Image (spheres, grey):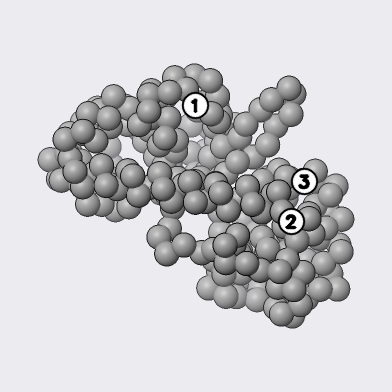
Amino acid sequence: MHPQDLAETRNLPLFRTMLSASFDALMQSAMTQRCPAGQELIRQGARAEYLHVVVEGSVELYAEWQGRRTTMAVVQPVGTFILAACVKDLPYLMSARTLEPSRVLLIPSSDLRAIFRRDPEFAVSIVGELAAAFRSMARHAKNLKLRTSRERIAGYLLKQSALAGGADRFVLQIEKRLVASYLGMTPENLSRALKSLEGSGVELHGHAVTITDRARLAEACEADVLIDGPDSEPLSDGVSLPGPALSED
């Protein structure tokens, strides 16, 4: 395993405070997998054999039912999935596939559970990570259930701006169809919602976004800290999409 991968994994909030001996033991049985774009990594309903750590590329987490499919999150380096199933030794509730050529670290769930029982700092980190993931899920459910599609996309654009350091110009890093699925819309509804926001303080050209009037855009979604956050600690595992890139224009 590449030393840089180990260092980046060690620095994740989940592993940062655990004992060095525990981390070394956890990595002994871990393995790195190189995957092409579009490769299925896990399937919902299967037993959780490994905790996955994305060290290169990107991975979509999605769920399916009765022929319908929805994007739950996109995980980028360095991020983990799916912790809760690994801790509980239960089936995955989501599937995962690579969106581009990726490198993924696989940590056996049985080793993770064993070290969870004997390393108190690691146990505290796992509880914190699961609590943060629950809060992320609760915010996302509130956003889907309480807001219109127009309000959801306005809130999403404001969050992307915040992730870009408050920038008024940025570039969305994933396909709009994934944004639509994550926000509970069809691509057509997303396009209509984006068009309806053109007079509310935002301009869009492809994946490039320019906020021309932040106050008007905030009014469009009625920004609420209990829905939009943020919480103080970043997540390694939760319901989210990647942040934007700063526009070069």
Q: Is residue 76 above or below residue 170?
A: above
Label pair 3/1, CB-CB below 8 angstroms: no
Residue 181 visible in the picture: yes
Q: Secondary structure at mark 2?
A: loop
The label number, if any, that marks residue 185 in the structure image: 3
- Residue 127 percent coordinates (x, y): 33, 44
Which numbered tag is attached to residue 249?
none
- Which one is earlier in the sequence, the residue at label 2 or at label 1? 1
**Distance from Cα at disc 2 to Cα at disc 1:** 28 Å
Q: CA distance from mark 3 to mark 1?
A: 24 Å
Q: Which residue is mark 1?
A: 92
- Whether residue 13 is situated above or below residue 230 in the rendered picture: above
- Which element type, helix, strand or loop, lies under badge 1? loop
Mark 1 neighbour density, 10 Å: few (under 14) some (14–19) many (20 or more): many
* Residue 8 vertical position relative to residue 201 in the rendered view, above or below: above
Q: Position of residue 142 (x, y in %)?
A: 64, 52
Q: What label sits on residue 147 in the rendered view?
A: 2
Q: Amino acid at mark 2?
A: Arg
Between marks 2 and 3 in the image, the one whose residue lies nearer the viewer: 2
Which residue is nearer to you in this view: 138 or 196? 138
Q: Amino acid at mark 1?
A: Tyr
Observer able to see residue 209: no
Point out residue 61 in the picture as x, y percentages from the top left corner.
56, 37
Q: Earlier in the sequence, mark 3 or mark 1?
A: 1
Mark 2 or mark 3, which has the lower sequence index? Answer: 2
Q: How busy is the neighbourhood of tag 2: few (under 14 within 10 Å), some, or many (20 plus)?
A: some
> Number of labelled discs?
3
Which quarter of the figure has residue 33? Answer: top left
Query: Which residue lies at the image location 21% right of the left edge and 47% below the top edge?
Result: 121
Q: Which quarter of the image is occupied by the N terminus?
A: top left
Q: Quadrant of residue 30?
A: top left
